Image: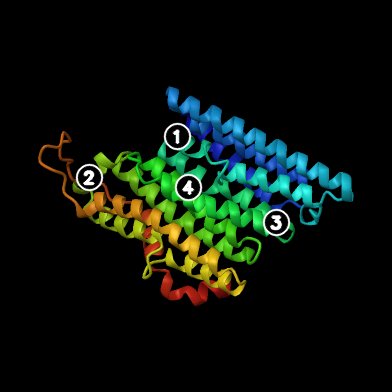
Amino acid sequence: MNPQANLIFIISLLLGTTITISSNHWIMAWTGLEINTLAILPLISKSHHPRAIEAATKYFLTQSAASALVLFSSMTNAWHTGQWDITQLTHPTSSLILTSAIAMKLGLVPFHFWFPEVLQGSPLTTGLLLSTIMKLPPIALLYMTSHSLDPTLLTTLAILSTALGGWMGLNQTQIRKVLAFSSISHLGWMAIIIVYNPKLTLLNFYLYAMMTATIFLTLNTIKVLKLSTLMTAWTKIPSLNAMLLLTLLSLAGLPPLTGFLPKWLIIQELTKQDMAPAATLISLLSLLSLFFYLRLAYCTTITLPPHTTNHMKQWRTNKSTSIMIAILTTMSVMLLPISPMILTIV
């Protein structure tokens, strides 16, 4: 793609995200979401492969439907209350429609079907944008309307998302699909706590985005898309592969690593809210996703492929990894000891 065109699309993405996050009026929030959708479409379909065109079409249709629902929800609320302010969403029907629309935007169960397919059809860099920056505007809208959302509905969606995200990721061999189901599972953790402690949702999202960015950028550096090629990629940059192992375990939420922090805080908050059964259930369901993270980690560094493999050994590259990956990897693994400082900032 032409670098100038690429730059315009990236600037439009940032513009759309900023408009939605900083707006008070529903129409401006909707405008930002639309700019975002239109800016990401060329980035998804830039390879001109039929799979990429299919992914772009699916993304356009689902996001259009979700945007229409956001507009319908705000109009219903304005009709009943005379308010166009985002924080004044008080009508129960409007909040129900909005929850459905945002669930569709994010890819929460039962509106999750588009997300793995779109991520599989996109390049790794576009997949990174879809998994991180494109999730920020809908989460910001949930944050602003969190006081009027239905806790029972969100808890149900969250537990279903964690269950299906873990369960459907088990038999995948394509790494982008595994990361898509991982995203659905993490969104479940964010959705369950949004009503009780919205800031915790944002903290969870920031840490998730950081760890996901590390994984996507690492995979892009070693040029790996499937589990079978991941097995032989360790010869390219062994140190980077070792850090990929730790980042995957951090994304799984294992204790000494950064990813444990949001899970720990969410379980603590749920217990305070007398939701110990929900906390227990969501913790047990996250063991499903732990299984496929461990499988990825095992293929990354621990296992050597059998000698009958069809893949040639890769040459070790002299290309040094970028400083960005180094910083992100360090933060993805080592932030847990400074968690009190992070909590004072948030």
For residue 231, which numbered disc appears in the image?
A: 2
Question: Which circle's residue, 2 or 4, is located before the other in the chain?
Answer: 4
Query: Judging from the image, what secondary structure is the residue with disc 2 in?
Result: helix
Q: CA distance from mark 4 to mark 3?
A: 21 Å
Residue bearing mark 1: 122
In the rendering, at what x and y percent does residue 21 appear? Answer: 67, 52
Q: Quadrant of residue 36?
A: top right
Please state which amino acid type lies under the numbered disc 1. Ser
Question: Which circle's residue, 2 or 1, is located before the other in the chain?
Answer: 1
Tell whether 67 sits left or right of 108: right
Q: CA distance from mark 3 to mark 2?
A: 45 Å
Q: Residue at x 78, y 47 (%)?
A: 93
Nearest the viewer among 273 and 309 is 273
Please state which amino acid type lies under the numbered disc 4. Leu
Tell whether 292 sits left or right of 234: right
Q: CA distance from mark 2 to mark 1?
A: 22 Å
Tell me the crowding category of disc 4: few under 14, some 14 to 19, or many 20 or more residues within 10 angstroms, Cα based.
many
Q: CA distance from mark 2 to mark 4?
A: 26 Å
In the rendering, at what x and y percent does residue 225 appear? Answer: 33, 39
Question: Which circle's residue, 1 or 4, is located before the other in the chain?
Answer: 1
Residue bearing mark 3: 150
For residue 164, which numbered disc appears in the image?
A: 4
